[in-house]
Amino acid sequence: MINSRLRFRFSDVSKSFDVLVLGSGIAGLSFALKAVQQGHTVAILTKKNKADSNTNWAQGGIAAVTSPEDDIEKHVQDTLIAGDGLCREKIVREIVADGPARVQELVDLGLKFAREANSEYDLGREGGHSARRILHVKDMTGKAIEDALLRAISREPKIALYEHLFGIDLITIGQGKNRRLQGLYALEVHDGRVITFRAPVIMLSTGGAGRVYQFSTNPEIATGDGIAMAFRAGAEIRNLEFIQFHPTSLFTQNNKRFLISEAVRGEGAVLRNLAGEAFMPRYHAQADLAPRDIVARAIDSEMKASGAPHVWLDITHRNATYLRKRFPKIYRTCKELGFDLAKDLLPVVPAAHYTCGGVATNLSGETDLRGLYACGEVACTGLHGANRLASNSLLEAVVIAHRAANSVTRYIAKHRNLASKPIPEWIDLGGTDEDERVVISHNWDELRRTMWDYVGIMRTTKRLERARTRIANLEREIHDYYRNFSVDPELLELRNMATVARLVISCALQRTESRGIHAITDFPKTRKRATDSRVRSSP
């Protein structure tokens, strides 16, 4: 909480709900549907349009055991292997076991996963999976899920959906173990008003923090807002050093990175270096279908060894008819950028993709701040460990959303008395200094370059310490600007990104080993005993 922005006296509360949901991806929308069905008043807040979410960008699909040729134990073991010793096995088993039922609920909402001619699911395969178990809607699975959930939300009159409302900070009451949520301050993006929401429960489903890096497959909204808000409110943040780099994003001269789904390699695509050699068999027995951390590091190694700006992805053995049908969005986008998927080798490089750590929760989405829940990429349940298995993210979101709704009902029954407690008033400090706006644009660029150069795929202690110093300087400048001028979306995102960058570095410096995504040359070996990295503030 930034006390300099608050006046501690009773103020009129603009909005009151039982439950606030921040974010409109698969985690938030699934949870909102379950919560309203249990009789709660629910508001969904999203800082952009309702369909702007990481979910909407997901190409691959959702991993779940639906085939008689697959089984739960195989999925569990694949997840544990990918997580490199840091997964919480009990949580892995429960989430994987719950998967088929939660997938069926999506189907019941009208989601039409791709099927074979015999009506069985057309299951894809991705890196790290020992069987075909990826349910998909071609290469637009995320959009299909988002559309189905938004249709369901539109049929629920008791759910209020607010677009262009940016969560600023959580409001808490009490001290120590007695602290709990009261509500939220949110910026109305179009007119600059700050609205106070009162609610005993807030679900953070704000997605990850990929935009903290210079090169990312994430949409622009992925600025770590929920992680930063939870940290400032005193919740535990866990294992944030594990930022997953997707091995194959399309290399372009304008620095934008378009994701080439892992499912392309699942259908036979091969990675080649600039000499044309298929190099992945030298790095792992599963070759091009090895877990993402291994493939990303292999590509990084090949690029550094040759000085090449990229490697090649080759699926030219497949004909255009098949590729247009299986990967319509990827095929079309590559064509627009001058590449024919059926004829050309694609230049690809790794890019920041998924935040495996986050706000620490249990299987019910509960954090250690009472009333605060987290679900989806913003959270750290222990499912992903040191490296997420492909397509387990959407699975985790629907399972935890389901369990969290039951927990919330029990919590609200005990804490309805918060309505009588005073809430501090937000102070608008007024105006901006245009001469100082360069702080935002300059620091935005410097922060992301610092993270890419010093906290990337391969790390050293010296680089991490340099990054810590640079980010600390940026944070001081950003905080000074925040204390003296009116807030706006760019400032709030930059403030959150700087906080998350500091937490990533802090967690990385705690881990004196190489494990999963976190590879550090000073400590190349993996310790026998896996431990979590943890950070929290003292609000």
Image (spheres, rainbow, N blue to C red):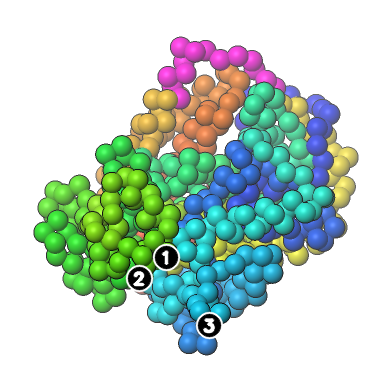
* Residue 93 visible to the viewer: no
Q: For this rendering, which residue is in front, 497 or 205?
A: 205
Q: For this rendering, which residue is in front, 399 or 256?
A: 256
Left or right: 275 in relation to 313: left
Q: Which mark is residue 267?
A: 2
Residue at 70%, 62% (x, y): give it: 404
Q: Which mark is residue 240?
A: none
Choose the circle earlier in sequence order: 1 or 3. Answer: 3
Residue at 40%, 79% (x, y): give it: 130
Q: Which mark is residue 118?
A: 3
Residue 448 position in % (x across, y down): 38, 37
Choose the circle earlier in sequence order: 2 or 1. Answer: 2
Q: Quadrant of residue 313?
A: bottom left
Residue 362 position in % (x across, y down): 62, 64
- Secondary structure of residue under mark 2: loop
Q: Amino acid at mark 1?
A: Arg
Q: CA distance from mark 2 to mark 1?
A: 9 Å
* Residue 418 visible to the viewer: yes
Q: For this rendering, which residue is in front, 126 or 363?
A: 126
Q: Quadrant of residue 280?
A: bottom left
Left or right: 383 in relation to 104: left
Q: CA distance from mark 3 to mark 2?
A: 20 Å
The answer to whether marks 2 and 1 mark residues whose Cβ atoms lie closer than 8 Å is yes
Residue 459 position in % (x across, y down): 29, 51
Q: Which residues are magenta?
A: 427-440
